[in-house]
Image (spheres, helix red, strand yellow):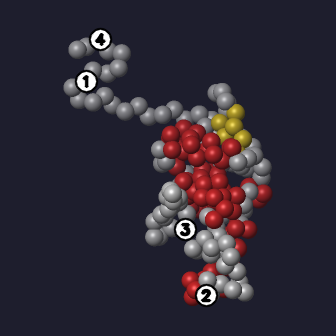
Amino acid sequence: MSHPKPRFHSPRTLFSVSTRHALLALAALPEDGTYRMARGLAEGLAIPFYYLAKILKRLRQVGILESLTGPSGGFRLARPSAGITLQEVVDAFEGDSGLSLCPLGRRNCRDAAPCPFCAMLGPGFREMVRHLARMSLRDLPHPWIPVVLPPGRRSPQRRPASPGKPPKGSTER
């Protein structure tokens, strides 16, 4: 019998790296409905491009983002940020237990009969989790977004050739 692999978070964070990157990317998208290229978002947020591409794809699959291919395409919010809850984003990456009322993930743990761990944390913890679940993207503080991205495509930076190797396309040997 195989057991599910536990998801470990850094002791300093409530969410996984994927969830944190998803929140950063969503908060960096404009409200006006313009599209942002994945590469430009990745560069501006200092997130590896292919990793962010997988995150954006997942957000599109669950209906949080829309995408459009082509030179004027990219990703945008599927609806206003006030209508996208933190719970939706967390559930997309961590399942329905991501913002569980019980930190141990026990489904039968309730206010009236809490598990010993929840009893120790007290009602303040449960209220904090309920508040986080109700928050929308618009409620998130925006100063933590590292950059404001310009509209349109941003060209990727080319890495210099390694020493001893000729540049690609060169006829030198």
Q: Residues within 10 Å of mark 4 (few under 14, many from 20)?
A: few
Q: Residue at x 51, y 32 (%)?
A: 155
Q: What residue type is labelled 1?
A: Lys
Query: Which of the 4 image quadrants contains residue 18?
Result: bottom right
| Mark 1 or mark 4, earlier in chain | 1
Residue 22 visible somewhere in the drawing: yes
Q: Residue at x 56, y 83 (%)?
A: 117
The circle on residue 97 is none
Q: Where does label 2 land, which residue? A: 119
Q: Where does label 1 land, which residue? A: 165
Q: Give the mark toward the camera: 4 or 3.
A: 3
Q: How crowded is mark 3: few (under 14 residues within 10 Å), some or many (20 or more)?
A: few
Q: Is residue 14 above or below residue 123?
A: above
Q: Distance between the residues labelled 1 and 3?
A: 45 Å
Q: Residue at x 63, y 58 (%)?
A: 95
Q: Residues within 10 Å of mark 1 (few under 14, many from 20)?
A: few
| Mark 4 or mark 2, earlier in chain | 2
Q: What residue type is labelled 4?
A: Thr
Q: How far apart are marks 4 and 3 (CA)?
A: 53 Å
Horizontal side of residue 64 vs 146, given as left or right:
right
Q: Is residue 12 above or below residue 114?
A: above
The circle on residue 14 is 3
Q: In terms of depth relative to the viewer, which is nearer, 157 or 22?
A: 22
Query: Which of the 4 image quadrants contains residue 153?
Result: top right
Q: Give the mark toward the camera: 1 or 2.
A: 2
Q: Which amino acid does label 2 sit on?
A: Ala
| Mark 1 or mark 3, earlier in chain | 3
Q: What secondary structure is marked by label 2?
A: helix
Q: Which residue is drawn at 58% across and 46% down?
A: 55
